[in-house]
Amino acid sequence: LLATQPARQAEVKIKLALTCAANGDSYEAVEHCLACLEVCRSLEDQMLEAACLFALGGIYYDAGEVRQAVEAFERCLVLRRKTRDKIGLAETLNKLGLTYCDIGYDLRAIDYFEQSLVICEDNADL
């Protein structure tokens, strides 16, 4: 099945967001992600919404907005679990581990890293 036009637009918005962020325009990057989230929610596409939240978390993290990054990654984590996206789940747990480590929540970081490791070990074929 081909993706719908709005889904393709949402995917392009994620790419635009990442490009803006790479060029130092985190404000514009966040705006593209927020627009993408609206589309994803209207489509009820949780996989795409999770991808957008993952990108948003990374943008916030790179911009030094660590608490906002945690919020985006935590929301992403919920969707990755709902959609049973094992690769995405492991990636999100790793990002959360790094982010929590940065704000001094070492025990929480270790917990996320260990959860990610279990997924990777249980799914060696990923």
Image (spheres, grey):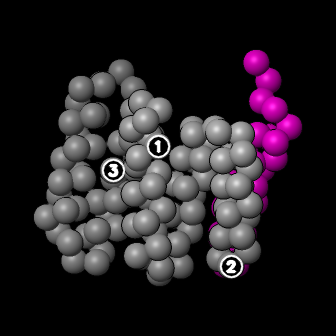
Left or right of 103, for residue 62: right
Q: Position of residue 42 (x, y in %)?
A: 72, 45
Q: Earlier in the sequence, mark 1 or mark 3?
A: 1
Q: To which quarter of the image does residue 32 belong?
A: bottom right
Helix, strand or loop for disc 1: helix
Mark 1 in CB contact with mark 3 (< 8 angstroms):
no
Residue bounds of the magenta highlight: 1-25
Left or right of 82, for residue 97: left
Q: To which quarter of the image does residue 7 belong?
A: top right
The mark lying in front, picked from 1 and 2, is 1
- Rendered residue at 54%/47% (across/down): 50
Image: 31 above or below 27: above
Q: CA distance from mark 3 to mark 2?
A: 25 Å
Q: Is residue 2 magenta?
A: yes
Left or right of 63, for residue 8: right
- Rendered residue at 39%/38% (across/down): 81
Image: 10 above or below 82: below
User: In the drawing, what numbered circle is on residue 89?
Assistant: none
Q: Position of residue 87 (x, y in %)?
A: 42, 35
Q: Nearer the viewer, residue 125 or 41?
A: 41
Helix, strand or loop for disc 2: helix
Q: Position of residue 100 (x, y in %)?
A: 28, 68
Q: CA distance from mark 1 to mark 3?
A: 12 Å
Image: 76 above or below 63: above
The residue tagged 3 is 93
The residue tagged 2 is 27
Label 2, residues with CA under 10 Å away: few <14, some 14-19, many ≥20: some
Image: 59 above or below 110: below
The residue tagged 1 is 79
Label 1, residues with CA under 10 Å away: few <14, some 14-19, many ≥20: many
Which residue appears farthest toward the right when viewing the image?
5
